[in-house]
Amino acid sequence: MTYATAFAALADPSRRMVFEHLRAGPSSVGDLARRVPVSRPAVSQHLKVLKEAGLVTDRADGTRRVYSIDPHGLAEVRAWLDQFWDEALAAFQAEAERTAIAGKEGTP
């Protein structure tokens, strides 16, 4: 899975809603279908795409499947986003240091 695959999977608003409901904890397709305004077959299809993107995992629980967020897939997305934060913090630090040095040079 790549971050691009994850973002493509999360681009659909209904799929994103299903994913967001999994924040509360593992859920079956039926449980999710009762909480979102899409049909049970649609929830199943959204979960299939999320699973293929590496964002959710599933396990058998009797005759049903229980889905949960996959922390490993989410970690890849976070790592991609963190690079921007790291760059922004480095740029802020460089500017703060440059401003501090310029201020000291301008003081008698």
Image (cartoon, rainbow, N blue to C red):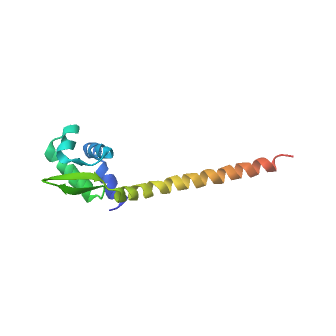
Residue 80 located left or right of residue 95 = left
Q: Which residue lies furthest to the right in this view?
A: 108
Give residue 72's position: percent from left, percent from top: 36, 59
In terms of depth relative to the viewer, which is nearer, 23 or 4? Answer: 23
Q: Would residue 12 appear left or right of 85 to someone viewing this image?
A: left
Q: Nearer the viewer, residue 69 or 87?
A: 69
Q: Which residue lies furthest to the left in this view?
A: 63
Q: Where is residue 3 in the image (x, y as percent from the top left)?
A: 37, 58
Residue 80 point in image, percent of width and height: 43, 57
Q: How many numbered tags mark residues here? A: 0
Which residue is outermost to the bottom? 1
**Residue 50 appears in which quarter of the rendering?**
bottom left
Across and down, in percent, residue 20 comes to 31, 44
> Relative to the observer, which residue lies in front, 38 or 91?
38
Horizontally, residue 52 falls left or right of residue 96, namely left
Residue shown at the point (81%, 47%) measured from the top left:
106
Q: Is residue 87 visible?
A: yes
Answer yes or no: is residue 36 visible.
no
Q: Specify whether 6 is left or right of 39.
A: right
Q: Which residue is drawn at 79% across and 49% down?
A: 104
In what quadrant of the picture does the N terminus appear? bottom left
Residue shown at the point (25%, 43%) measured from the top left = 14
Tell me where residue 38 sits by quadrant.
top left
